[in-house]
Image (spheres, helix red, strand yellow):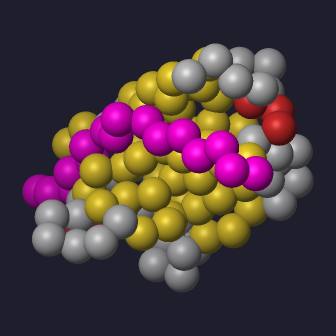
Amino acid sequence: VQLVESGGGLVQPGGSLRLSCAASGFTFSSFAMRWYRQAPGKERELVADTNSAGSSTNYADSVKGRFTISRDSAKNTVYLQMNSLKPEDTAVYYCNARFLYFNYWGQGTQVTVSS
């Protein structure tokens, strides 16, 4: 099982990034997918999630209206489009796959929002 995040980096406030999480080794279409983030000295927090079909999404209040989660079952990939980025969005972003008692994590990708 692998979840490989990519797309992080350094961006100025107000900028955009798109994170990708490529999944392999399990039945992607059966799993709900989530993005979490963890800033230095803070607990990991749920940013966005989507159900296995991609028909339902939820967002943390802090990112609602700025971030969009989506999934492509043909590519076994989940995305996080991040717009209007703020310095407080700086964190390591983690991809998570969950189904019943199966719970998989990626290694994380760093997002830094700074001028």
72, above or below 40, in the image: above
Q: Position of residue 11 (x, y in %)?
A: 24, 47
Is residue 26 found left or right of 18 in the rendered image? right
Q: How many marks?
A: 0
Q: Position of residue 41 (x, y in %)?
A: 14, 71
Quadrant location, the N terminus? top right
Is residue 47 found left or right of 41 in the rendered image? right
Report the residue that reaches farthest toward the front. Answer: 101
Q: Which residues are magenta?
A: 100-115
Q: Position of residue 64 (x, y in %)?
A: 57, 73
In front: 88, or 49?
49
In front: 51, or 88?
51
Report the residue that reaches farthest toward the bottom. Answer: 61
In front: 24, or 86?
24
Residue drawn at (54%, 75%) of the image:
60
101, above or below 9, in the image: below
Is residue 109 found left or right of 58 in the rendered image? left
Residue drawn at (54%, 81%) of the image:
61
Q: Position of residue 26 (x, y in %)?
A: 70, 24
Q: Quadrant of residue 107?
A: top left
Q: Is residue 112 visible?
A: yes
Quadrant location, the C terminus? bottom left
Q: Is residue 12 visible?
A: no
Residue drawn at (64%, 18%) of the image:
25
65, above or below 25, in the image: below
73, above or below 106, in the image: above
Q: Quadrant of residue 29?
A: top right
Residue 7 lies within the magenta run = no
